[in-house]
Amino acid sequence: MNKLLICLFILLGVAALGFAGYPARAQDDLPRFEETACWFDTGLNVTCGTLTVPEDRTSGAGPDMPTVQLPVAVFHSTSADPAPDPVVYLNGGPGSSSIEYADYWMHEPAFVLLLADRDVILFDQRGTGYARPSLDCPEYTYMVFDQLNKDLTLEEVNEQFVEVMLICQENFTSSNINPAAYTSAANAADLEDLRAALGYARWNLYGVSYGTRLALTAVRDYPDGIRSVVLDSTYPLQVDLYAELTTNAHRAFTTLFAGCDADASCNAVYPDLESVFYETVDRLNEAPVTVSFMGLDIRVTGHLFIELLFEQLYRTNSLPVLPIVIYATHNGDYNALQFALDAYLGQSVHISEGMYYAVQCSEEMPFSAEAAQAIDTGGIPPQMLTYFNANNDATYTLCAQWLTHPPNPIENIAVTSDIPTLVLAGEYDPITPPAWGERAAETLQNSYFFLLPGHGHGVTRAGECGALLMVEFLNDPTTPPDASCIDELRGPEFLVP
């Protein structure tokens, strides 16, 4: 346990201070942008600041009303004559920070290409990252690490999850934070206030994952200031994330197995990958193994193995090694799990779980229970059904107690718009499948949809083709971008000895 605690506190860092700083009291001059020192070091020309807005968007600002402070970074274009309309990046989650990853972001090809023509804006959405107040939940992260080497059933793990998240909710309330105020609609209002405060007549929205849902919400609520939209790995309002979770995950796994089968070299070295995967899941569920990682002893069950591979399907650069991971684990070599465990543990540290469930419990779960009954799960292996259905049940249980206000039906209705929109999807994406991008495009009159083979989640940040499509689209949103780079893409180049 001492090793667990030491590693946990190192990873958490200042995250344990998530409740530090009560919501400041609103002033009459809201929204307000004030320049500050940046939260990161960079040799680029960047202006940082804080946007202060009302916490409760339904009642507005007043001398005694709480506010939220959102960190903002405006990266100025490297062009001597930049376009007047910047790109604002909308991160995923919900609950992920943009500012925390600014050092990493600024070195990505997509970021460099965007800066060549226009300013790029990063900001932490309410409740995330460096925003204050934060809806981070250190108790959740502690729970994840505490469970790593314990002999717990899937049901016991999920029971603890519900208990811990309700404790977090109580902590928010006692800290004068209202989780009901942390929604996509409130995020979109913050976004509009930011545009006005920075003095841009129009700008371009660039969303990835949940950021696409936020972009669509902004298109619905504040269309006038939006020149164009890029939706990468789309999460439309009308879909049911949890109702379709198991089928979407199964589709991605099946795509992986089929991809290896169709690759002569992969199939020769890793034949019948699907059967080997499920044999491994069954074996680990019957007899979990302990794997050492970063000084931690981690009990790997079949359920955790599914989760580890599921998360790696997000990452385009991980796809080529997944057959190796499956076969190595099946053969008793658990070293191949190291990189997957690193991503899994990092995910629990770098997301504001309170913000995630504040959004999902008010905008997604209320519409999912009935839809789940209509989903055809025939043909999905029982291992997959057991794992994802148990997770869904835990989230349903939590949201039934978390939700403090009636859901707004508009949050389940497709967004209709004629704003030029580029919709991009990855073939292997396990969480926002290509079909969701196509469904979003159906009600976006001036949209262009492209599927990128061999890609997972977040195609603009995973390779040159997606980034080039985005930049060309932004240069002229009224014309379909040249998609010839897609013709050069193939499935993952699976690594074989």
Image (spheres, rainbow, N blue to C red):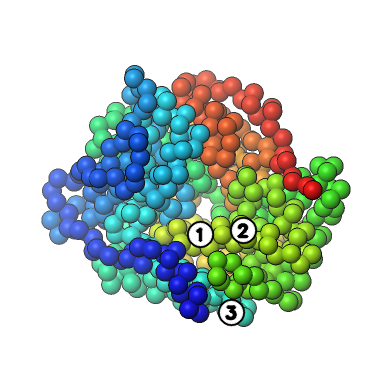
**Above or below, 471 relative to 296:** above
Q: The residue under label 2 is which amino acid type?
A: Ala
Q: Earlier in the sequence, mark 3 or mark 2?
A: 3
**Residue 455: where, in percent of width, then height?**
64, 41
Name which quarter of the figure residue 246 lies in.
bottom right
- What secondary structure is found at the residue carrying circle 2? helix
- What secondary structure is found at the residue carrying circle 3? loop
Q: Nearer the viewer, residue 137 or 62?
A: 137
Crowd class of label 1 (few under 14; some 14 to 19; many from 20; radius 10 Å): some
**Residue 366: where, in percent of width, then height?**
48, 61
Marks 1 and 3: in contact by CB < 8 Å? no
**Residue 130: where, in percent of width, then height?**
33, 54
Marks 2 and 1: in contact by CB < 8 Å? no
Q: Which mark is residue 346?
A: 1
Gap in Å between the C-alphas at discs 3 and 1?
Answer: 19 Å
**Residue 210: where, in percent of width, then height?**
48, 48
Crowd class of label 3 (few under 14; some 14 to 19; many from 20; radius 10 Å): few
In percent of the image, x 27 and y 65: which residue is there? 20
Marks 2 and 3: in contact by CB < 8 Å? no
Crowd class of label 2 (few under 14; some 14 to 19; many from 20; radius 10 Å): many
**Above or below, 381 relative to 51:** below
In percent of the image, x 50 and y 79: which residue is there? 1
Q: Earlier in the sequence, mark 1 or mark 2?
A: 2
Q: Which mark is residue 340?
A: 2
Q: The residue under label 1 is which amino acid type?
A: Gly
Gap in Å between the C-alphas at discs 3 and 2?
Answer: 19 Å
In percent of the image, x 66 and y 74: which residue is there? 290
Q: Which mark is residue 150?
A: 3
